[in-house]
Amino acid sequence: MAAAGGQGRIAPWGTPRLWPLPARVSVPSPWQCRTRDVLALLAALFVLLCAPTARSAEPELAALPLPELTAKLNARYASQQPTQWGPALPGTLTRLPASAMTKNGLVTVALTFDACGGGYDASIIALLRELRVPATLFLAGPWLNAHPSEAADLAADPLFEIANHGARHRPASVTGRAAYGIRGTRSVAGFVDEVESNARRLAALTGARPRFYRAATLFCDEVAVRIAADLGQTVTGCTVAADAGATLPAPAVARNLLAARNGDILLLHVNKPGAGTGAGLRSALPELLRRGVRLVRLSEAADAAGAASR
Ligand SMILES: [Zn+2]
């Protein structure tokens, strides 16, 4: 499927393709924000009150052998036909929870890096370690296959949270729908395998099950979002595609980082060593730290939000 939108950019998985996402996904106008908040509240109420398939995580599912788990979720979802398709469906985390970003009035943002496949920009990891900047790293199966020792090295470092970017790096579909020309998973079973087999692989790598899942290309249908929730995987989008699929030159990456606002989830890539991402980070991170910007892993933000609600 051809993508609509922008021209000549490169998508987050790194091959030359269109990149229609605006750099900032959120809408800055206060009126629009209020409208968006109201709509989000109504959507949440609908999910809570009406949608029979909206479930919270079911820990017992993760304990089932994969074939049994797949059969169970297939029975639950195979009759459901998705009607939505996009990078920020209801149930997708695109900003930090409000209660996680108000601490001391500081600007709090989350740096997230996708490792889709291909290479490894070790200079980014070295920079984060040098500056003691935490980040959440979404690792996909193709990248794990290519970089087992690097994956073990990252998993052993508490500076980083390891998150799930899918076993085969596919858009999150139950019907084979494509995004940017990349075919999504084709069925409930295909999507369960995409999420769960990589979650189990990462759990074996890190000793803890990942909590956050980001679909390749960010695109999901709503049935896939429900399945991921059942599996305890919070579908994660972004507020700002800060390196536009690792296509931006360093000054543009730096500008996006320096423009970060409270609660932003910034998406960058660690699998494109030749991109401007690394140099943009080297330029911008010291200034963000000088400003007192608080950089958090996603779990920290989620846990802070949970504590605030108790
Ligand atoms: Zn990716």
Image (cartoon, helix red, strand yellow):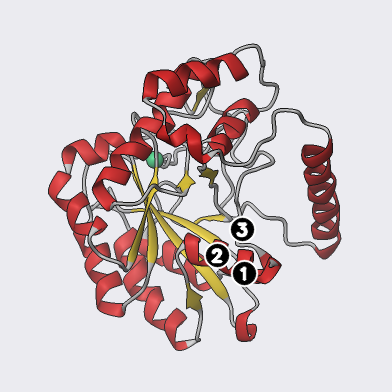
Query: Which quadrant of the figure has residue 24?
Result: bottom right
Question: Horizontal placement of 269 versus 84: left or right?
Answer: left
The residue lying furthest to the left in this view is: 149
Give the residue at x 79% y 62%.
29
Q: Earlier in the sequence, mark 3 or mark 1?
A: 3
**Please, is residue 90 above or below residue 85 in the view?**
below
Query: Which quadrant of the figure has residue 142?
Result: top left
Please, what secondary structure does the residue beneath circle 2 have? helix
Question: Horizontal placement of 48 versus 167: left or right?
Answer: right
User: Mark 3 is on which residue type?
Assistant: Arg
Question: Horizontal placement of 30 versus 118: left or right?
Answer: right
- Residue placed most toward the observer, 32 or 139: 139
Task: Give the distance between the C-alpha atoms of the residues marked 2 and 3, in whole angstroms.
Answer: 14 Å
Q: Which residue is mark 3?
A: 95
Please, what secondary structure does the residue beneath circle 1 have? helix
Q: Earlier in the sequence, mark 2 or mark 3?
A: 3
User: Mark 2 is on which residue type?
Assistant: Asp
The residue lying furthest to the top in this view is: 79
Please, what secondary structure does the residue beneath circle 3 have? loop
Task: Give the distance between the C-alpha atoms of the residues marked 2 and 1, in whole angstroms.
Answer: 6 Å
Q: Which residue is mark 2?
A: 303
Question: In the image, which is nearer the foreground, mark 3 or mark 1?
Answer: 1
User: Mark 1 is on which residue type?
Assistant: Ala
Is disc 2 in contact with disc 1, using a CB cutoff of under 8 Å? Answer: yes
Give the residue at x 36% y 66%.
280
Residue at disc 2, CB closer than 8 Å to ligand 1: no
Give the residue at x 46% y 79%.
288
Give the residue at x 47% y 42%.
214
